[in-house]
Amino acid sequence: MTHASIYVAGTAVSLLLDYMDQAGLSLPAFRSRLEGLKATPRMPIATWWDILAELERAHPVPALGIRIGAVTHAHHIGMLGYLGIYSETQVQALMRFSRFQRLLHNMAPSKVYVEGDDLFVWWDPAAGISPLSSDEVLVSGLITLIRRHGVDPDAAPHLVEFPQPQPADTSAYEAFFKCPVVFGREALAVRLPARNMNQPVRTSDPHLMSLLEQQAEAMLQELPDRDALLKRLRHHISMSLQDGTPEFGEVAARMGMAERTLYRYLQERGLRYKVILNELRFQLARDYMQDPKLSLPEIALLLGYAEQSAFSRAFKEWSGETPASYRRVRAGNPPVSTSRA
């Protein structure tokens, strides 16, 4: 079976070229390589990571990805950028960003949802974690487009979360985003003020938007489905949880694949079986805990844990809180406080 590679649109390379022009960087050999990549519809994600790393070595400045993302204009991300700047409101722009994200890259599906006063943009970590520089470009580019085309040129998120370890110097992040920035989190995520995201996009064009959306739908249909095997893997892991913690070989057999083949598939995409298993368990745990009829021991069994204590330890590692606390807070009941002597 042939599986499509993880890709990034070639238009993203033009962003690096424009940054180099702005920063006064010559680097003729590197520039020549970028010019060649710019002409390709899509490039492997590993190539994108490689050219970012090469630029970092040649131009070692703190938070380079943030600086690159700050140069972003709609044309740097192709159709996805135009869908955003011609939407009526910023919420609509973000929803289209999530829906058509595969026109830019297929590394990690994104979700846009409201939680309290925040509008979350969240990237699924199940496909693996990108280098920090790549995530920097993505998130700072998104915020830059919001500032360029929204009504507030100083728009700031409430919080930005990165899954990578914290760098020694975080001042550039907070200066750019104008909000707290945390590292070592579950996934790449941005919390935006939901009220502000309902504001209009200054460059809105409903008629052009309608035409572009039709074109984007057609383009989306032509893209390969890179997630098909990963979806199968997650499905078979989920089915195997009922019999306890599923072993890699057992799941490969259920899928009708040789262990070596499945291992190579994951390795080529920077994925690890244990990470996928734990992320699926965490996702299912959160879903199950929304059902008040399910007790914590029952949820532990559904997730393949022989004892509730093992589930509780794992959940605290994933979320930073116990299952009981997590469920209590999301049910609207604050944790019970204890006085100190």
Image: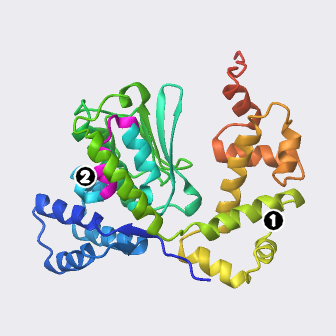
The picture places residue 40, in percent across and down from the top left corner, at: 30, 76
Label 1 packing within 10 angstroms: few (<14), some (14-19), many (20+) = some
Residue 301 is situated, as x and y percent measured from the top left of the image, at 87, 49
Identify the residue at horizontal 33%, vertical 33% (top origin): 156
Residue under the point 85% across and 53% down: 305
Q: Amino acid at mark 1?
A: Pro
In this view, the residue in front, 29 or 72, is 72
Residue 25 at x, y = what percent?
A: 13, 66
In terms of secondary structure, where does tag 2 sit?
Answer: helix
Image spot of residue 158 (x, y percent): 41, 32
**Residue pointed to by mark 1:** 246
- On screen, residue 102 above or below 318: below
Dot 1 and dot 2 residues touching (CB under 8 Å): no
Q: CA distance from mark 1 to mark 2?
A: 45 Å
Residue of label 2: 74
Q: Amino acid at mark 2?
A: Ala
Say whether residue 38 is magenta.
no
Range drawn in magenta: 79-91
130, 36: nearer the viewer: 36
Mark seen at residue 16: none
Q: Residue at x 40, y 42 (%)?
A: 94
- Residue at image point 50% right, 52% down: 163
Residue 252, picture quadrant = bottom right
Q: Answer above or below: position of 66 versus 12.
A: above
Q: Is residue 81 magenta?
A: yes
Mark 1 / mark 2, whichever is N-terminal: 2
